[in-house]
Amino acid sequence: MTIYESVLAGLEEVRRHLGQTLLSLLGLILGTGSIVTVLALFGGQGELTQQFIEEVGGVGTIIVSDRDEALRPTARELASKRLTYRDAAFLKARARSLLAVSPGWARNLAYRVADVSFEGQVIGTVPDYAFINDIRPLVGRYLSDLDLRQRARVTVLGWAYADSLFGTAPRALHQLVSIGDRSFRVVGVMEREEFYFAAWSGNALAYRNRRAYIPITTAQTLFSPDDRLSFLTLKARPEHGAAAAETEVTSLLFARHGVEDFDIRASGQRGSEDQQFFLLFNFIFLVVGVVSLFTGGIVIANIMLASVVERVREFGTRMALGATAGGIFTHVLAEVVVVTILGGVLGLALGTALTGTVAHFMQMPAVVTPVIAGSAIVTAAVVGLLAGIYPALRAARLSPVEALRYG
Amino acid sequence: MAALIAARGLTKTYRLGQVDVPALRGVDTTVDAGEFVAIVGPSGSGKSTLMHILGCLDTATAGSYHLDGEDVSRFAGKRLAQVRNRKVGFVFQTFNLMPRLNVEENVALPLKYRGGVPRSERRERARALLERLGLSHRIGHRPDELSGGERQRVAIARALVGSPAILMADEPTGNLDSHAGAEVLATIEELHRDGHTIVMVTHDADVAARAQRTIHIADGRVVA
């Protein structure tokens, strides 16, 4: 009917009271802007997270850990030996859905070479560990099955430790290093690992460069009274899938322990601290955005209500000329939506500028995609629809006689 | 000839808090096609209420009202809006043109509300009427660029564009100086000569004298 005229009327309102309209749209503009920024940064962050998960083992990696002990453990729970190297060997032999089994033992021990000494992490593990974590030696080799069987006193150093103990990685090869007062031969040095969520956030994988790997059998013989594990990482066969593997591992371990005293989860379910910081950051921005949209909507509803009261006689005349209540309702609603869509466009511009600035200064990948731009405009239109309902109802419910007599 | 307007026992009561205030107390009236009738009376007599009911802007509390052979006294909402759009053309004291629309768009507005009239036809009919009323040179102007007399003639064109059965004018000269008022009255008389049925509400005896027939209202009743 008169949608075109409503659009025209909306634009005319904007033109006639430019300052007032912009002021009334401020909340909406800020709200749309901050939501656009959040979605753009979040999109960039999501891509990075995906890369990080690939870097630390990829999809299909399963992490098994001891469940926290109950306050009053049952007899079965007390009887269980918890996760042990024997559990890992059992899974390796029996679980058909697993491609790799990587048990791990971790301890902080003293490192010493000549007069350089410090305390640092030692990981006792198996050859599969390198496969699951997709890490390679820079020089020399990684741990072998033979090392494991012989309980060999060999070690593969992390890049940073090779550097600090021997000056450079190649020079460390074949040297002796004292770890926990026992002598180990360096058979390899790992590549330097790095991953950056943002230029300012530091190397998320730095901890992996500061450790040494030794055979888990050696570790448990020399430094441990039992064969309990610190962690157990598994990789499912792609054709079976992580879910099937989790089920199989759960039943196999349950049969051995007699009680479910372990937890199983897929990798990537818990974000790193960096990611959690970003989630919080995004969440706050999102809340600010939604609150701004809400207050923005209320302001718009209020201004529109005033405009309806100001134009009561106009609506009365339209009714006298044959406009129905529904026609008046649509007319007012269309006017509000035109104004809020304009606010959405301005908010999108603000959000794009803000995204560019943040991405530039924080060196983070972020881009306002067409989908984000579209949702910003749609959101603004929805705010307009909601804010316009009451004023439009007020206009549509006017009695023609009363409206014509008004003013 | 059948009466265009046939009202029997029209009663209108407004409720103000606990008190019923009667505005019309049983009005019988008929207007034949082609008549030019003036409704006169002092303010508060009920003449505006009568015109609102006859123009289908309001409905009577009791009584029957046939407009152009249709019993509209039981109509409401959308149907009443349709009757207003097709059968009645309104001219107001304060012109009530849409300030954002130009003259042609203002005149074509009732056809837009009617629906189903193509844009080209709306333009054509609006332009034809404006030409007939001597306003062709004002087609693209906004209402605030026109004189009072011109605005009222634009309003008359808007009232006529839908070919209504009846033209209702509520104090059409009330906001005009005597020269412009005379011009507008001359236009209305010319329309009457062309066969249009006109009902005009006024409290000005000189203006009422231009009509063929006068209906006097006092205290909600027809007195003469």
Image: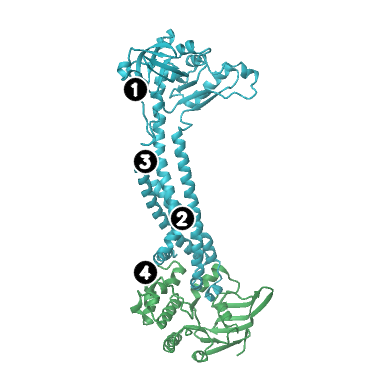
Chain colours: A cyan, B green
**Camera-nearest residue between A102 and B212:** A102
Same subunit: marks 2 and 3: yes
Q: Which mark is residue A204?
A: none
Q: Answer with the quarter of the image where residue B53 lies.
A: bottom right
Name the amino acid, label 2.
Gly
User: Which circle, 4 or 1, is nearer the viewer?
Assistant: 1
Same subunit: marks 2 and 4: no
Chain designation of label 4: B
Q: Which mark is residue B120?
A: 4
Q: What residue is shown with label 3? A: A362
Crowding near the residue tagged with mark 4, few <14, some 14–19, many ≥20 C-alpha atoms within 10 Å: few
Labels 1 and 3 touching (C-beta < 8 A): no
Label 3 – label 4 distance at C-alpha? 58 Å
Q: Which mark is residue A191?
A: 1
Crowding near the residue tagged with mark 1, few <14, some 14–19, many ≥20 C-alpha atoms within 10 Å: some
User: Which circle, 2 or 3, is nearer the viewer?
Assistant: 3
**Horizontal and vertical percent position of residue A298:** 51, 58
Label 2 – label 4 distance at C-alpha? 42 Å
Circle 3 sits in a helix, a strand or a loop, which is it? helix
Q: What residue is shown with label 2? A: A27
Looking at the image, is B80 positioned above or below residue A103? Answer: below
Name the amino acid, label 3.
Met
